[in-house]
Image: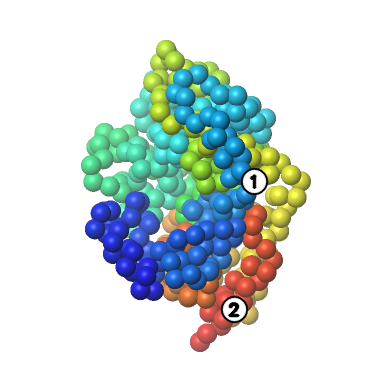
Amino acid sequence: MPSSHRLLEQAQQILPGGVSGAIRAVEPTIAFTRAQGAYLFDVEGRRYIDYLGGFGPILLGHCHPEVNQRVMETMARIDLIGVGASEQEIALAEKLGQHIPSAEKVVFCNSGSEATFLALRLARAATGRQKILKFQGCYHGWHDAVLMNVISEAEKLGQKDPLSAGMLPQAIDDTLVLPFNDLASVAEVLRDQGQQIAAIILEPLPHNMGCVLPAEGFLQGLRQLTLRYGIVLIFDEIITGFRHGLGGYQRIAGVVPDLTTMSKAIANGYPLAVVAGRADIMDQCQPGGDVYFAGTFNAHAAGVAAALTTIEILERPESYPHLFRLGERMRRGLEQIVRQAGIEATVVGYGSVYLLYFLRPPIRSYHDLLRNDGARFLSYRRQLIEQGSYELPVNLKRSYISLAHTNADVDQTLESAHRILHRR
């Protein structure tokens, strides 16, 4: 792809590594210049069925006409005021309060990392404690308190594994890391350090290591333990929020956390993030409160308009059934292909999320995923890309289906998977 390579070489002259993010540089290097519905188009004009979805925000489909129309109409009359609250901002907050069980009060920011940063600050302020607890394999943003122990090498398990230079040692020391789905380990740590821990933060369904479903009773057990020790329970629903339902995964699980963070699919690709939760905790960040919170672009009119339209579309009775049917069609098709091919692989997912691990079950925690054949995982996805289906060629990363995808799109991808996995 000579045009893609030329464009990316140009980018490297002015952008560090030629990209604006840590995992945007992947092989094969493709420069995409257009996106529409379920498809991406590269600079050469080739079309790909998109299962990356911008890392999850594209829930309705790229450049959704209803969303874009609402944004354009809004931006024609109001953009960035900087003081007070807009009618649309209030309407969106009320909508979130209707749908999300934990959302007694809501504030807006612009990215998932900002949202989790604020949630942890609120938890520390509410408890007067410093330590937090996260789980191996869960990603909660690139700030110091949580940027560790995500996709760790085997020899790093059981120890601190910070992902970046320049992180504050105290922040690293104050973050405890445990295996997901291991409630006994959590209980043991809390017996010893429970009075020092401000928050437990987790993806209630961890998608940053693909898709590891919470074991029966795990989320409920965390809720009981955090109540016992006065710890703030934070559900990081940056991915699961709206993707799996308007109420987030918390409504599906029947567990209400103290604080919730959401972003990605909430505005179908426009920048917007949410921190929602108990009123007494959230009120700490009101003007004059104990917790300072600000941002020039918070509740920007474009993102708010996009989110309102996204919610309205998702409220339609056919939206989630369509998403879930397509996800199930993909997973069942892959399961049949794997069975016929007789290969060591496991198909997992939930709702509109799916992926194919090259390992045998069970899959309960990140430790189990170390058995995944990473080389085969990457080879399979790169071959899919060659055949016109774009799944991110990075080990353990999930794939997404949008409302814009069709049965024909899924079937085309399954035909490609069959050709690839049946090669000997």
The residue closer to the viewer here, 242 or 15, is 15
Relative height, residue 424 to residue 189 (above, below): below
Q: What residue is rendered at 40% in x and 66% in y?
A: 30
Q: Give the structural element (helix, strand or loop) at label 1.
A: helix
Relative height, residue 305 to residue 421 (above, below): above
Q: What residue is rendered at 37% in x and 63% in y?
A: 26
Is residue 352 visible in this depiction of the protein?
no
Q: Residue furthest bottom?
A: 424
Q: Position of residue 188 (x, y in %)?
A: 44, 37
Tell me the amino acid under the disc marked 1.
Glu
Q: CA distance from mark 1 to mark 2?
A: 36 Å
Image quarter in which the N terminus is found:
bottom left
Q: Position of residue 117 (x, y in %)?
A: 40, 33
Q: Position of residue 399 (x, y in %)?
A: 54, 59
Residue 17 is marked as none
- 1 or 2: tag closer to the N-terminus: 1
Q: What residue is rendered at 52% in x and 51% in y?
A: 56
Tag nearer the camera, 1 or 2: 1
Name the residue tied to disc 2.
418
Q: Position of residue 202 (x, y in %)?
A: 48, 41
Is residue 45 visible in this depiction of the protein?
yes
Q: Residue furthest front?
A: 76
Q: Give the structural element (helix, strand or loop) at label 2.
A: helix
Name the residue tied to disc 1.
66
Relative height, residue 298 to residue 402 (above, below): above
The residue closer to the viewer here, 362 or 60, is 60
Query: Which of the 4 image quarters holds residue 2?
Result: bottom left
Relative height, residue 197 to residue 28 (above, below): above
